[in-house]
Amino acid sequence: MTEQTYAPGTYPDLPPPSDTVGPIHWLKVNLFSSPINSIVTLVAMYLLYLSLPSAISWLFIDATYVGETRKDCAPEGACMAFIGERFNLFVYGFYPAELRWRINLAAILLVVAGAAVLWDKMPARKHMIKFAMVYPLIGAWLLSGGFFGLEHVGTHLFGGLMLTLTIGVTGIVFSLPLGILLALGRQSKLPIIKYFCIGFIEFIRGVPLITLLFVASTMLSYFLPPGTTFDLLLRVLIMVTLFASAYMAEVIRGGLQALPKGQLEAADSLGLNYGQAMRLIILPQALKISIPGIVNTFIGLYKDSTLVIVIGLLDPLGIGRASVADTAWLGLSTEVYLFVAVFFFISCFGMARYSLYLENKLNTGHKR
Amino acid sequence: MSEAQSNSTTEKCIEIRNMNKWYGDFHVLKNINLEVCKGEKIVICGPSGSGKSTMIRCINRLEEHQQGDIIVDGTELTNDLKNIDAVRREVGMVFQHFNLFPHLTVLENCTLAPIWVRKTPKAEAEKTAMEFLERVKIPEQANKYPGQLSGGQQQRVAIARSLCMRPNIMLFDEPTSALDPEMIKEVLDTMVSLAEEGITMLCVTHEMGFAKKVADRVIFMDGGEIIESNTPHEFFDNPQHDRTKLFLSQILGH
C-alpha cells in the first residue's frame, strides 16, 4: 500500500482493513483464535458428528407421530404418538372436555392482554392496558366459573399446561407490584413499615418453597378460624406469589441502590412529592436496571410451579410422571420428559429473549 | 436593575437564624445567621468540608437542620411536608453532577415538574421549556437524551429545567466543578445572564471571576461557620480575617 499523506484536519474516514471483517475473520476470532480454542472447536464438532445424526433419526426420521397404540410405534424411533394421544391431558389437565373452550378463550385473551403490556406499539394500547388490568379477574372467572352463568369447575380438576400458566401468570402479575412495595418499604424511614418488610422478606427467603406449599396445603387451616375453607389452588397461588415477591423485592432493592442519590435529590428539589418521585424518576430507572434479575425471578417462579406436584396438583411434569406409569404405553419416559422439557424451555427462553429486547429498547445511551 | 436594588433593602427572601446542624456527633454547621434580600446575588466560597454545600442544601431541605430557623419566602421549614414542598416549588437548584433524569429526553426533563407539580397543561409546559432551552442556547437538543450531551450542555439543561418551574430563588451547588475548562465558560455565561435578570441567586463556587462580576456579597465559610461576609470589592481587596487571607492567597496565588 502506498503511504498517502493528508493535510492536517482533512484526514478522511477509511474503511477497516479487509482482514478484520467478514466470515473468515469471524471463524478465526471465534473458533480458532488459539491452539486450545482450535482443539475445543474440533472436539465439539466431533461430538456433534457422533450424536446429532442418531438424535435426528430417533426424533424425526424413525419416529412415529401418528398412532393409536404402543404397537404402532417403530421400536427404533421416538414414540411421539403417545404424546399426541395424551396431548389434551397435557394442555387441559382434568378439565371437563365440554368446557375446554373456556380455557381456550382465557388463553386467547391472555395473549391479547400480554401483548398490550409487553408490546408498546400495540394499536389502541391505552385501552388495551385497561383490559389487561382487569384480565386476572376475567381469567379467574373463565377458568373457575361459579357465577354470571358459568358452571363452577373445581380447581382440583386444573392440571397440565393451564395449571402452569395459571400459577406462572398469577405469580408474575402479582409478585412484581408486591415486590416493588416491599423494596420501597424496606427503605422507609418509618420503623414499623421498614421492619415489617425486612421481617417478611427474610422469613420468606429463609424457608424453602416446598415448605410453604405444605403449609399452604395443611397448616393454613389451623391458623384460620374454623369453618373457613380456602381453595387449595388459591392457597398455592398466594404462597407462590409471596415467595416470588420476597425475591423480587431484593432484586429491585439492588436496582434502587444502584441509582445515584442525586436523582432523588433532583426530584425533591423540583418539588415532586414522594409518590411522583418514585413513579416518574426512581422506579423507571431502578426497574430498568433490575430487568435481568426480575426476569430471572420470573423464570425461577415459572419453573418452581412444578413443585405443586408434592401437594397433589398435576402440572405438565406431574401429568408426564403419571403417563409414564401407564401400562398400555410402557417405556416412554424419554419422550414424555423430553416433551415437558421442551415445553418449559420454550416458555423460559421466550422470557429471556424478551428481557434482552426490553433492555435494548430502554437503553437511552447514558451508560458511560 | 435599579428597581431590584431599591426593593432589596425591604424584602427578605431567605432568613436563616442561629441554625445548627449535626451529622451524628459531627457539628457541620455552627450558628449560621444569614439574610438574603430579594434579587441579591450571593457567592459562597470556602475550603472543601467547610459546610457551604450543606448550608445551601438546608435552604430547600435536602438536608435537615436540627436547631434554629430557616424561613424561605415567608414559609418556615419544619417537618411539615406541605411547607417543604411549597418551598421547593419556589426554589430551583442546580447540582455539581447535573442530576438530569437519564431516562427522559431533555424536553421531558424540563416539562416534568411543571406538568406534575404546577399542573401546567403539556403544550404550555413544552412551550415554556423551549423558551428556556433557547435561553441557555440548546433548543436543538430538546429531543435528545442527557447521555448524548456534553457536560456543559447537560448543566445548561439542568439550569433550564430549574427555570421552567419559574423559581424566585436559584441555588447553585458548585455548578462548574465537574466540567472541563472549555465548558465552564458556557455555563458561567448562562449564569451571568440569569443574574442580570434580577433573580435571587446563592452560588457555591470557586470561580472567583464570576464572584467579582456578579456577586452583591461574598460569603466565606470555614469549619461550619460563616467567617466573613462582604462586598466582592472589600472581600478580595481588603479581607478582614487571617483565615480568609490564607484562603484567597491559596486559590488566587497559583
Image: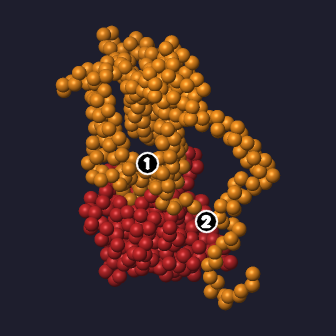
Chain colours: A orange, B red
Mark seen at residue A86: none
Amino acid type, label 2: Pro
The answer to whether A115 is drawn above or below residue A1 in the figure is: above
In the image, is A209 to the left or to the right of A140?
A: right
Mark seen at residue B47: 2
- Chain assignment, label 2: B
Q: Position of residue A255 (x, y in %)?
A: 51, 46
Q: Considering depth in this image, is B65 or A110 the residue closer to the camera?
A: A110
As measured in the structure, the alpha-carbon distance from the residue carrying label 2 to the one carrying label 1 is: 36 Å
- Chain assignment, label 1: A
Q: Residue at x 81, y 52 (%)?
A: A35
Q: State which quadrant residue A93 falls in.
A: top left
Q: State which quadrant residue B18 falls in.
A: bottom left
Can residue A207 be spotted in the picture? Answer: no
Q: Secondary structure at mark 1?
A: helix
Residue at which label 1 appears: A283
Q: Residue at x 30, y 46 (%)?
A: A129
Q: Residue at x 49, y 38 (%)?
A: A346
Do tags 2 and 1 sit on the same chain? Answer: no
Q: Position of residue B91 (x, y in %)?
A: 38, 63
Q: Position of residue B122 (x, y in %)?
A: 28, 63
In the image, is A248 to the left or to the right of B11?
A: right
Labels 2 & 1 near each other (Cβ < 8 A) = no
In the image, is A255 to the left or to the right of A275?
A: right
Question: Which label lies toward us, 2 or 1?
Answer: 1
